[in-house]
Image (tube, grey):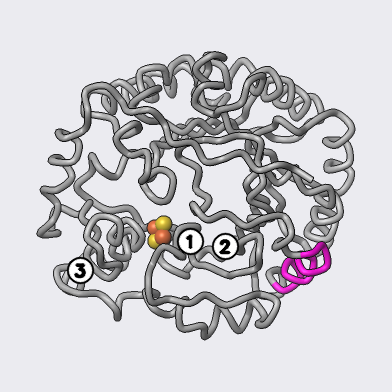
Amino acid sequence: MALVAEITHRCPLQCPYCSNPRDMAQAGEELSTADWQRVFAEAAALGVLHLHLSGGEPMARRDLPALVRTAAAAGLYTNLITSGVLLDERRLAALAAAGLDHVQLSFQHADTAEAERIGGMAGAQAKKIAAARLVVAAGLPLTCNFVIHRQNARDVAAMIALAAELGAGRVEIAHTQYHGWGLVNRDALLPDAAEVEAATAAVEAARAVHRGRMAIDYVTPDYHADRPKACMGGWAQRFIVVTPSGRALPCHAAETIPGLSFPDVRGLGLAEIWGGDPAFLRFRGTGWMPEPCRSCAFKAEDWGGCRCQALALTGDASATDPVCDRSPLHGALPALIAARAAIPPAFVYRRPVRQS
Ligand code: FES
């Protein structure tokens, strides 16, 4: 079981597929240091093993070493998910001394100009590369993460080569998910079959080259699939996400679902939320499922796919995820891909949010 702590929505980057909601929390709304420390202690007591410190850019919070220290003392494995642009030797040393276990560093591309165009931040690539080298030099395990879309899918080989050159133990090549900002920018991001094939072939070739030295994870694109993924390992089965302002969610996009209200960790303990909150129970397990999910042999494997994607594509979060070829709406996905503009439209960037 894992806790994703979105400790801030502030970030110097403006990625057009950002997983933050379009209506982002401001600095004044964020949980205090003491609030987060209590949440981490409650998570450990509940049986959470992994803590993902995420954002926004988590390094925008000056109290990050104190948060890591509390989490490590509670026995949580701490993973910092960062753009790297605010990381320097002094701040990394403070995090390592506090007990940080792992760093996941996001890149937008291997090419500097393209990376900075996609991320909307001049000078970011050199900072990321410097951050990666610092992490490896500090002896911390490094994962490099690249989000893939139609504007970089043919460049995956160069991305994996960059990760290897930086000394990453793992690289994650993950196709964009179309919620929030990704949904706003879908036409600019959605790859066609040839672009997906190019990315997949590059991953397979690189796996043969790097086997035994660097693991390569590949998150395939839902819109090109016939079987849905078990999103977040099933609704409220493996993950709790806590937003900067303290709402507990089963996934990062859950607040897009109308009719659900999510609890505030300042008013309710994580154990009560996990065990009995109505929003957490709403899609947990298989009892909520309509046909064709209800009679499907895979219902306890894919858990009906992604509720937020079902909402985005059908207007109904309780519908079968149209990624599944048993959904009556499965044919809408090839139609969406075929209908994309030949020239990608300009990105709608998430606005930059100042750090404190
Ligand atoms: Fe919410 Fe998939 S992102 S269930």
Pointer 1 or 3: first along the chain: 1
Q: Observer-nearest residue: 99 or 243?
A: 243
Residue at mark 2: 241
Question: Does the beta carbon at disc 1 come under 8 Å from ligand 1?
Answer: yes
Pointer 1 or 2: first along the chain: 2
Q: Are marks 1 and 2 in contact (CB under 8 Å)?
A: yes
Q: Callout 2, which amino acid?
A: Val
Q: Observer-nearest residue: 170 or 95?
A: 95
Residue at image position (25%, 75%) is 289
312 relative to 10, above or below? below
The Cα atoms of the two marked residues, 1 and 3, are separated by: 20 Å
Across and down, in percent, residue 172 comes to: 50, 34
Q: Secondary structure at mark 1?
A: loop
Label 1: how many Cα within 10 Å (few below 14, some 14–19, many 20+): many
Q: Callout 1, which amino acid?
A: Cys
Residue at mark 3: 293
Q: Secondary structure at mark 2?
A: strand
The range drawn in magenta is 32-42
